[in-house]
Image (tube, rainbow, N blue to C red):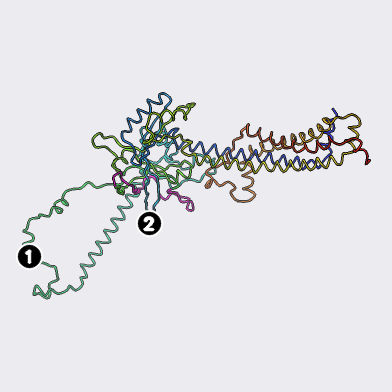
Amino acid sequence: MYKILLCLRYLRTRWIALASIISVMLGVATMIVVNSVMSGFTHEMMTRLRGSFADLIFESTSLDGFPDADWHMAKIREVGGDRIVGVTPTVHVPSMLSFQVNGQWINRQIVLIGVDPATQASASDLSQNLLHAGNRQKLSFDLREGGFDLYDRQAPAGEAQERTDLKHAGWEYRRFQAERRKALERTQQAEAALREQQALANPSPAPLNPAAGNSSAPVGVPTDSAATDSAAAPVTDPFAQRATQPEQVFDPAKEQFTGIILGKELIFHDALARFLVIPGDDVKISFPTVGHPPKILSDNFTVVDIYESKMTGHDGNFVFVPLRQLQEMRGMIDPATGSGRVNAIQIRVRDGVDVTELRAEMAAAFSKAFYKIETWQEKVGPLLAAVAMEKQVLNILLFLIIAVAGFGILAIFFMIVVEKTKDIGILKSLGASRQGIMGIFLGYGLSLGIVGSGVGLILGLIFVWNINTIRDLLEYCTGQRVFDPSIYYFYKIPTVVEPLTVGWIVLGALVIAVLASVLPAIRAANLHPVEALRYE
C-alpha cells in the first residue's frame, strides 16, 4: 500500500515530472494523428486504384497481344467458375494525342486503351469516373446532348468551382462550332470573290505575246480557232468526270468521328482553370499498327466524355476508345475468322474470394511463356510499397519523440533517487524490501506513462476527428490554402483511425516509461540503509 501512496504523492508534488508527461503526451498524440492521416491517404489511394484496375489482369507477354479473346475469356470462366463476376477485353497502345488551341497544335503522350462498352462495366469501374451521368449508367461512345457534371461530385457544397466550359458541351457545342466554321468559310469565300471582282475591274497590263505575232494579246489566251477546237474536243480526263459526280460530305453538325474519352489532366489548364478541349471537339490520335515493321497511323476522333479518377497518373495518361474500332484501325482483326487480338483481359471476382489462389490456378492453366497474370496489388506494387515504407519511416522518426521523453524520465528519476536517499534509508530500516523500493519507482514510471499516453490518446483522437475544422481555422488565420485540393485531389483530409495501431502506440509509450525507470529503481533498491542514513 505504501508504494501506491508514494507514487501518487510524487505524481502530485513533483512538478518536474510534468515535462516528461508532456513529452509522452505530445509523442503519442503526434503518432496517432500522423498514422491516422497516412492510413486515410492509403485507404483513399487504394480505393481509387481498386476502381481503376480489375481484381486480376490477364496480359499477353507480346506487344501484339493474343488472338481470339472470346476463347480466352471462356477458358478463364471455366477455371474461375462462379468466383468470377465479369471479364472484359482491352487493348493498350502507346500513342500521341494532338489537338488545336488558338490555331496551335498541342501534343500529349498517352496510353490509348480500347474497351468494350458492352462488358467493361462488369469488370471495371471506368464508367463511374466519367462526367456524364448517362455514361455512368451505361457507357457509350456516342456524343450526348449535355448532361455533364458542372461541379465536382466529391466536392462539398460551396467549395467546387462551376465548370462553365461544360454548360453547352455535347451536340449543342458541336453544332455551334460547325455553324461557326461554315460562317467563317462563307466570309472567306466572299472576300475572295470581292478580290477577284476588283482584279477584273482594274486589270494590270498583260505581257506581250511575240510568238503569236500580236503584241496586244496576253499570254495564255487562246485564239478563236483554238477555243473552237477546245470546245469541240470531248472530255476524257477521268478526274474531271469524277468531279461531276456527287460526293457525300461529312457534316460535323450531324455526324461525329469515332468517340473518345480523354483523361481530365490531359486537357485541363490549371492556370486558366478551364478545359482546352470539351465534349464535342475533334482531336487527332497517332498510333502504331501491328505490322512488321509497324507504321504510324493518324485518325480523327470526337471527344464524347472526360475521365476523372482523381489519380494524376491515370487522368494524365489514359485515353479510351471503342475496342472494335481500335482493332480495325491497327489491323488486329483476323480476316478469316473476324476475331480480334487483345493485349489484356480484366477480371472481376466476387467479394471474399482469395485472389492469390485464383491467380495461381489460372497461371497453371495458361502458359507462362505467353501470358502474365497479376493481381491489382501486384500491378501497383511499387507504389504501395513506397507508401508503406514512408509510413514506417515516419513512425520510426516520431517514436524518437517518445524515446526522448524516456530519457527525460531516466534523468528525473536519478535526481529523485539522489534527493530521496534519506527517505529510502528510512523505508529500508523500517523493513521495506528491495522489491518494494523498486516497485515505488517502477510504479512511478508506469503512472507517468499512463497519464502521458492517456492524455495524448484523447488529444490525438480529438485532433483527428476535428482535423478539417482545424485546417479551415488555419486557412482563415493565414489566408492561404493549407490543403489545396488541386494538388492533393482531396477536398477533405482523409483520416482512418486503426484501433490496433493506436493500441501499439499507447503500449509502446508505457513500455518506454517503465524501462526508463528501471535503472533508477535498481539503484534505489541497492542502497544500504546505513549508508543512506550516514550522511544525515
The answer to whether 393 appears left or right of 345 in the picture is: right
Q: Is residue 284 magenta?
A: yes
Give above or below for 243 relative to 134.
below
Q: Please state which amino acid type lies under the numbered disc 2.
A: Gln
Q: Residue at x 35, y 28 (%)?
A: 74
Look at mark 1 in the image and give the residue it sits on: 226
Residue 4 seen anywhere in this rendered image of the structure: no
Which labelled disc corresponds to residue 104?
2
Q: Residue at x 87, y 39 (%)?
A: 420
Q: Gap between marks 2 and 1, in whole Å? A: 49 Å
Q: Is residue 478 magenta?
A: no
Q: Element under label 1?
A: helix
Name the foreground residue: 75 vs 138.
75
Quarter of the image that includes the C terminus: top right
The answer to whether 334 appears left or right of 393 in the picture is: left
Q: Position of residue 474 (x, y in %)?
A: 64, 47
Residue range of the region highlighted in magenta in the rendering: 266-292
For the residues labelled 2 and 1, say whether their Cβ atoms are less than 8 Å apart. no
The answer to whether 332 appears left or right of 491 in the picture is: left
When asked about the image quadrant of residue 87, the answer is: top left
Q: Position of residue 277 (x, y in %)?
A: 40, 49
